[in-house]
Image (tube, rainbow, N blue to C red):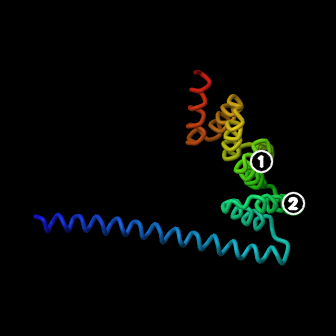
Amino acid sequence: MDNNLAIVYLSIFVGILTFAAVGVFRQILKTRKIEGSFARLRKKLEKEKGTTQEYYELASIYSQKKLYSQAIALFQKALKSAQEEAEENIAPIYNGLGYVYFSQEQYDLAIRQYKEALKSKPNYVTGLNNLGHAYEKKKLTSQALETYEEALKLAPNDSIAKRRAESLRRLVSA
């Protein structure tokens, strides 16, 4: 009996260790991929002019690393490159720039960038959610609720917009 219990405990322990090892291994692979892209893009863009996508990608990596001033400069280069290339899908660039400003608690600048994203792509649900969040941080509850409800019209099952709109509705009705 004690032997069977020991085997069960050992099996559970080995299962947990395997799960943890797989998780760590996946994180290592993900980090290596990001760092590889980071090094490749940085080296390339130091030597020559890049594409809109390359500037955007490197700016996003800087943003993830919380190196915001470098991210801002690269998002701006991505916007300039997008104008030169007549790129139409610029909403993610403005959204990324808004996120960087939001992360630095520069909510007015973030709101301006999110609005630019929505100007170029009015049905951009991520931009609407981010704009709503920035409005919330500025304590502009009614604008935030309106923005989340607009997101829900476009994507009725969007969990972020649903959760935030419900929370704000309770706040407004209280």
Residue situated in front as seen by the camera: 49 or 110: 110
Mark 2 closeness class: few <14, some 14–19, many ≥20 residues within 10 Å: some
Figure disc tally: 2
Element class at badge 2 = helix
Q: Position of residue 118 (x, y in %)?
A: 76, 44
Residue that lies at the very extreme toward the left in this rendered image:
1
Picture quadrant where residue 4 is located: bottom left
Q: Which mark is residue 134?
A: none
Examine the rendered structure and indicate whether residue 65 appears above or below residue 47: above
Which quarter of the rendering shows the C terminus? top right
Q: Position of residue 48 (x, y in %)?
A: 85, 76
Residue on which disc 2 sits: 80
Sequence-wise first label, 1 or 2: 2
Q: Position of residue 121 (x, y in %)?
A: 76, 47
- Mark 2: amino acid: Lys
Instruction: Work out how far the residue at label 1 is from the one at label 2, CA to CA, in angstroms.
Output: 15 Å
Left or right of residue 63, residue 18 in this image = left
- Mark 1: amino acid: Ala
Residue on which disc 1 sits: 117
Examine the rendered structure and indicate whether residue 50 appears above or below residue 82: below
Residue at 24% in and 64% down: 9
Left or right of residue 82, residue 1 in this image = left
Element class at badge 1 = helix
Residue at 70% in and 50% down: 103
Residue at 72% in and 76% down: 40
Left or right of residue 109, residue 14 in this image = left
Picture quadrant where residue 140 is located: top right
Q: Position of residue 45 (x, y in %)?
A: 80, 73
